[in-house]
Image (cartoon, rainbow, N blue to C red):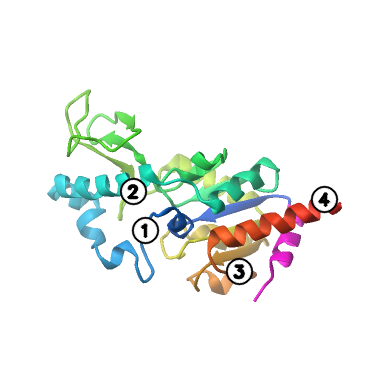
Amino acid sequence: MDTIEEVVEKILESKYCIAFTGSGISVESGIPSFRGPNGLWKKYRPEELATPQAFSRDPIRVWEWYKWRMELIFKAKPNPAHRVLAELERLGFLKCIITQNIDDLHRLAGSKCIVELHGNIKRARCISCGYRVTWNKPPEEIPPHCPRCNSLLRPDVVWFGEELPRDQWMKALEHTNKADLVLVIGTSGVVYPAAMIPYIVKENGGIVVEINIEDTALTNIADYILRGRAGEILESIYRVLKQRIERL
């Protein structure tokens, strides 16, 4: 098993370190992940809840599920993993976070450079006129309607079968192509095109560090593997990094 000290050394040597995060980083904040033994997709079928077709077929059912998730997310607080990444950015060691998460916890933790590949559950958009709204609590009306044209609002997230927001994908590629090190945290690495991020860094000669509780589809390309909870590992990285800085 690779050591925290080895990873810290690589972070210190890095000129452009980024983080690529998935739902596993937010489990410690009480938000269920999608895959794994207790993942949401073990209990729910994606095609019934997270596709444009499902929304067209039964918007009330889709919104009831998203409202339940929103209630969890609005109560959630950033955990040590989110806070360490924000601090690494503040210190200049981390340039940007590219996330698959829609829970907004990176922003709440204080991170500034965040690319949201899959949208944000705290936002909704009109299916007709493009009106957008950001909520500070789950909507009371289910399904919610657009105040401008009275069409349905939908969660401003990327569903299965949809393309990523072009502006966010282009920003992600911009940071990824500059990166010489990527911290891959809490992602299964099976959802594309997002999962291309570590591969691009690797192909460009960069270093891939995987932080996860288990092996993933990205383990075989990782240069360093740290097994365990994201919060504990990132806190250890931060502690060793601070010790190294103080000795410099």
Q: Which mark is residue 128?
A: none
Mark 1–mark 2 Cα distance, whole angstroms, equals: 9 Å
Q: Earlier in the sequence, mark 1 or mark 4?
A: 1
Mark 3–mark 2 Cα distance, whole angstroms, equals: 28 Å
Mark 1–mark 3 Cα distance, whole angstroms, equals: 21 Å
SS state under label 3: strand
Mark 3–mark 4 Cα distance, whole angstroms, equals: 24 Å
Q: Which residue is mark 3?
A: 226
SS state under label 2: helix
Mark 4–mark 2 Cα distance, whole angstroms, equals: 39 Å
Q: Earlier in the sequence, mark 1 or mark 2?
A: 1
SS state under label 1: loop
From where the camera sits, is residue 200 visible? no
Q: Assess disc 4: are there few (<14), some (14-19) or many (≥20) residues with their C-alpha within 10 Å of its C-alpha.
A: few
Residue farthest to the bottom, as pictured: 1
Q: Which residues are magenta?
A: 1-14
Q: Which residue is mark 4?
A: 246
Q: Hey, what amino acid is under mark 4?
A: Glu
SS state under label 4: helix
Left or right: 130, with 201 as reference point: left
Of labels 3 and 2, the one closer to you:
2
Q: Earlier in the sequence, mark 3 or mark 4?
A: 3
Residue farthest to the left, as pictured: 57
Per the picture, the main secondary structure of the magenta-coloured stretch is helix
Q: Which residue is mark 1?
A: 32
Q: x, y (%) of residue 31?
A: 38, 54
Q: Is residue 35 shown above or below 128?
A: below
Q: Which residue is mark 2?
A: 72
Q: Hey, what amino acid is under mark 1?
A: Pro
